[in-house]
Image (cartoon, rainbow, N blue to C red):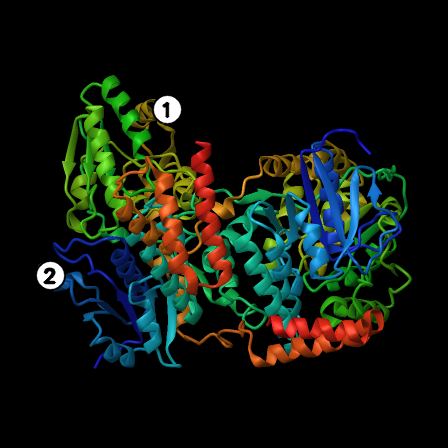
Amino acid sequence: MLKNKILVLSEGPPPLGDTPAEGGSLRAWGLAKGLINHGHKVTFAYRSTFKIGDYDKQEIPEGITLTVWDGDKIDELLVAHTVIVMRYAMGEAKQIVSRLEDHHVLVSDNYIPISIEVSARNSNDEFEQHNFLKLQKSSEIASKRADYILYASPAQKNYYLGYLSGINKINPKTYNQLGDRMFEVPYGVDPDERPKKLSSLPNNPTLLWYGAFYSWFDMESLINSVRDISKNIPNFKFIVAGAKNPYNKDPGILAHYERTMESIKKAGINVEYIDWHPFKDRFEVYEKASAIITQNHLGLENELAWRTRLMDYVLAHRPILTNGGDPLGEDLISRKIAFKTTPADLLATFKYVLENQPDNYRYKDAASRYSWSNVTAELARSLNNPRRLDSGEMILKRDYKHSTKVLSSRIMHYPAYIKKNGIRQTASKTKKKLLGK
Amino acid sequence: MSSINKSKKVLLLSMNNVPLNGDELVEGTGLRWWRMAHGLDAQKSLDVTIGVWKDFPLIKNEYEDIKLINWGFGDDSDKKLLDYFDTVILPMSMSGQSSRLISYVGNQQQLIVDAYAPFYVEASTRSGSRTFDMKNDSWYEGMVWAGNEALSKADYILYASDNQKFFYEGLLSGIGGFSPESAGVERFVEMPGVVEYSKNQFISKNIKNRDKLTILWFGALYPWYDIKSLLECFNDRSISKRAQLLIVGGSNPMYKKTNLRFNGQYNEATEYSKKLGIYGKSVFFSDWVSYSERMEVFNKSDVAISLNADTLENKYSWRIRVSDLAGNGVPVITNGGDPLGEMLINKGCAFRTGIDRDSITRTINSLLDNKELLEDAKARLEQYKDDLHINKYAKELSRIIIESNKPRLERKVQSFVLHKIHKQAQQIIKLSDFEQDNKILLAENAILKRQIQNLPKTVREHIKYSIKFRIQKNAEK
């Protein structure tokens, strides 16, 4: 029987050995690693349908117990743990919440504003519509049950306070408790994952795009700018790594990928492609770059997003080029390890960073600020003494009690109405109202 | 009346009174609408009417170019009233009235909902910061229902600050008012609570040689303010011999004295002042004043003070009283944390203080020792006064009204139902593209009539109109 207090539920597998991993599971793994740094014992459970590649047992940090979950095993896991950490829009969130007992403390990981992200996929596919509605429901159920809520940035805090007000999680009963229940836990980094020595900059000026071509990246503008660079900088190389996420089957995202590949082809840019690869191999790719680029579609999604890929680029010790607008991008710009650029001035910015590489201490400071250990510190302290939120949901349903209150308040108005309109008209109006209902 | 041809008719509906004569006691939406009506009217292309709740009988039906009318005389009467207008502007939550009024706004009309007062957190603060009052459950519940409905159905939402915008985006996500189809449709219009140009200007006085400064607390002592430490400062001789505190309208007369949610802190403040022995000596309480009288109060004051309680509400609030003071040239001392307070502090128009007694004492002493700081702040307020003026924001709102956009109709509520119907229609007509979109839409309509009979009437109506709207748009193309 597992004796840990905290269960971190992940959809995908942890990034062990050659196992490819993606955002959600990397996040869950990061949270687990952060929490054990503060003395907690954590069970990390991933969906049993995933297989982990070969890995060395030493890769699992002390304090983390690895296991799998599925419909059969979930009850056993829940019985053995008090605190459940789970992404609020996880496919099975609804089912898992329904199995929680009163004593279970739920930490709802809301670091992606799911309604906004799904909407930003710009898909009209029927599947996407159903997906959206399903995610809406599961995220609402998880948030309503949550005892602690994690978000990634101050902008997200504003967003979630509105969200929680809308679903009636914030109300006069819970209002004074929520200050201690919402934690800013951005997607972090593990500074120890960085190889002790990375090779110096490549001889040829090389720009790297690292990560999937998601719909919220403005690939069209970027492709045009890269074409300009390739014409103006001798021996320029453009590397695209992991452009297609093998786990993601969202039609909007797949369509965006296809469109982008088509545009690159049409632009005639010479590109070196590197497939999606195990997480641990990413530094070999980072090493090939003089700078790493990203280009956001500006707007609501960007303002609320936490660009996880930017976070990891910090460990690469390579300057980042971005048009910003997202909270992390803007922070890295202020730390002078990212450089704000637009498609129009990308060539000039790239030339500048080739000559002016940031000092290494700046990368180290950022990595320290966003280390998993640091970003989970406050949450870990609270989980030393995990408590249920006192009141849970308020009422927000038109129950009998409410109806009688409304009725009694209306009856109070009758004498004045009769005085003004007479008994006959009052009776007629009452009859009309009752029949109407 | 102006002879200019006004293109659109706009109705602003209020449950409160408006300062038509200037001698009325006004608050809340009445004041807000009065200012917005001035701003919209100044754009010269809108026919603006304020609807005032029937309990406040109007003594005249026009003020300059703005029309006024009473409402609330029953369903038929109110529906007819709303039918006349192209655009209806409602506060986010009018409790029992909201749902009824929203149902009267037809598909051809534009619905704008004003959300500048963050009701959701404000209402919680009222109860949360003092004793929790179970009696208000139903009231809160009703207001939340009304707010959720109004926000999800609005074509446009008026907000006061960036914090609020993110807050409402999140709220819409939570209540299903945000969907893949509405992504990219901007429904938010910035409209903070700011002032109209006043006929009675604040008269700035030379205070360099004054022995005693008058510090003004203007407005009710709602639970999202915190005055206790300020009172304690006036128990300190270093302050009381050189300054006096004037608390005007600390109790809102629109609420009973026994209403502790609104007037509880006022009762405590008067008691505490008496206990400290400063009541009527260095701290003076006076009643809520009429709209025109407030300028006289401003003129009696050298600087104002507004101290926000450390609650969640502060971050989402827009302090109307502070914008009224600053917009009329009165510098303010504040602990900030609210968007307007922070903006004024950053522009050098307000003085930051802490909320504790020592910080407030230090800040007041610093101003007493350096009165030129107040003069500098007044000069900067003059420089930035347009930022606190309604005309700056009314331009954008006016444009939206004139263009008559109705984003709510472009969002397809129950979109998944529509999508399935669309696929069936495509199969019937055997077309694979949208070149003959109208034919498909007509086929959809036929299927729709059969399929949606079991859906609620409002949803049926919405879906039907959505299809009609698309047909109309296609025809325009």
Vertically, is A376 above or below B161? below
Name the front one of labels 2 and 1: 1
- On the image, the x and y values in percent for residue B171 come to 50, 57
Q: Depth check: A260 or A362 in front?
A: A260
Q: Chain of mark 2?
A: A
Q: Amino acid at mark 1?
A: Asp
Locate residue B429: give its quadrant.
top left
> How many marks can you see?
2
Check disc 2 and report its element: helix, strand or loop: loop
Q: Earlier in the sequence, mark 2 or mark 1?
A: 2
- On the image, the x and y values in percent for residue B432 come to 26, 40
* Label number found at residue A345: 1
Q: Which residue is mark 2?
A: A56
Q: Amino acid at mark 2?
A: Asp
Residue at image position (11%, 60%) is: A55
Check disc 1 and report its element: helix, strand or loop: helix
Cα–Cα span, label 2 and label 1: 46 Å
The quarter of the picture where the C terminus of chain A appears is bottom right
Residue at image position (74%, 76%) is: A427
Is residue A259 among what the camera can see? yes
- On the image, the x and y values in percent for residue A249 come to 22, 51
